Amino acid sequence: MKTNASTTKRAREICEKLLKAERANKIEKSILPSEVSVIDRLLERGLEVEDAYDELYSKLSDDPRALHSFFDLLQSVGAFWNAESNQEARTDKARLVAVNKKIERVASSLAKLLNERAELKNHSGFSCNTLYHPVDAIHAGADGNYGYEQYVKEKLEEMTGQFDLKYWPSLGAVIQAIADDAARAAPSPHDALTEAATEGPRAGLADTFRAFFVAIEEGTGRGFGYLPRSFDLTDRSVASLLSCALGLAAEQAVDAPYVKRLRQRQRERSNQS
């Protein structure tokens, strides 16, 4: 893509002025240091993204909010969906699976013990002063909760008095329900960016690019953002912007063919789903 040198220089100046203002604002407020680092990398490698800035400005200059919006999402993706963050997200997902499995095992064992204790209390020659009604357990668990004490406890006590114990689940049944719930649980992402950045079998650079594409999709009018509905960037611009935002060294930086292949795979997945 041929560009006019003076136009390209002007576009870079405008984009970098915006980034510098963002940087100053974040530093003044002592917020988002990871995004400040992304800005620093973009400013340090301004020559590498000069053509990308020219494309951005040519497509977004009609609405200053759109240019701000783009750089906001670029900073966010670079800061929170880099390789380390993507691996951490996968680790959290695996840990959630493991925790649910452990809850299932422990809760099932506890339910059996609670049922055994109830049987002994009811049919042996001994008893012990322990919780037996599920509402008593709720009261104990809510100890110190002002809102519960003021607005909930009395109503539950009224219901406890109205209905015999046979109408309530046993403690063992309640705990077993928790075990069954954990057994059915499957991790699901909170948002589309998390889903995109963790959909692959292993963490990698492609995760960040997928998150970036979703962020742009959500930033357009289709996602009630300020970017134009038809907004898109060339493979070359995407490659240079993210390579610099992520601080990839020359031997790690991606090129336009990499982005093109990734986009093609994404389209193929979408067509299959």
Image (cartoon, grey):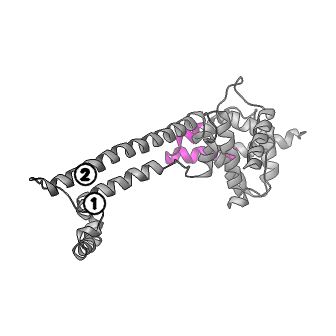
Which span of residues is magenta-colored? Answer: 17-37
* Location of residue 72 in the rendering, given as x and y in whole percent from the top left corner: 64, 49
Query: Is residue 121 in sight in this rendering?
Result: yes
Determine whether the residue tagged by mark 2 lies in a helix, strand or loop.
helix
Majority secondary structure of magenta residues: helix
Using the numbered discs, state the Cα–Cα distance from disc 2 to disc 1 in whole angstroms. 9 Å
Q: How many marks?
A: 2
Residue hosting label 2: 114
Q: Residue at x 59, y 43 (%)?
A: 23
For badge 2, the amino acid type reads Leu
- Tell whether position 83 is magenta: no
Residue 247 lies left or right of residue 62; in this view the side is left
Q: Residue at x 49, y 40 (%)?
A: 92
Residue 49 lies left or right of residue 147; in this view the side is right
Q: Residue furthest top?
A: 251
- Tell whether position 22 is magenta: yes
Looking at the image, residue 143 lies above or below residue 151:
above
Label 2 close to label 1 by CB (< 8 Å): yes
* Location of residue 135 in the rendering, given as x and y in whole percent from the top left corner: 26, 64
Residue hosting label 1: 170
Residue 255 lies left or right of residue 73; in this view the side is right
* Location of residue 6 in the rendering, given as x and y in whole percent from the top left corner: 85, 41
Q: Residues within 10 Å of mark 2 (few under 14, many from 20)?
A: some
For badge 1, the amino acid type reads Ser
Query: Is residue 42 in sight in this rendering?
Result: no
Looking at the image, residue 199 lies above or below residue 219:
above
Picture disc at residue 234 = none
Q: Residue furthest right?
A: 2
In front of the other: 145 or 122: 122
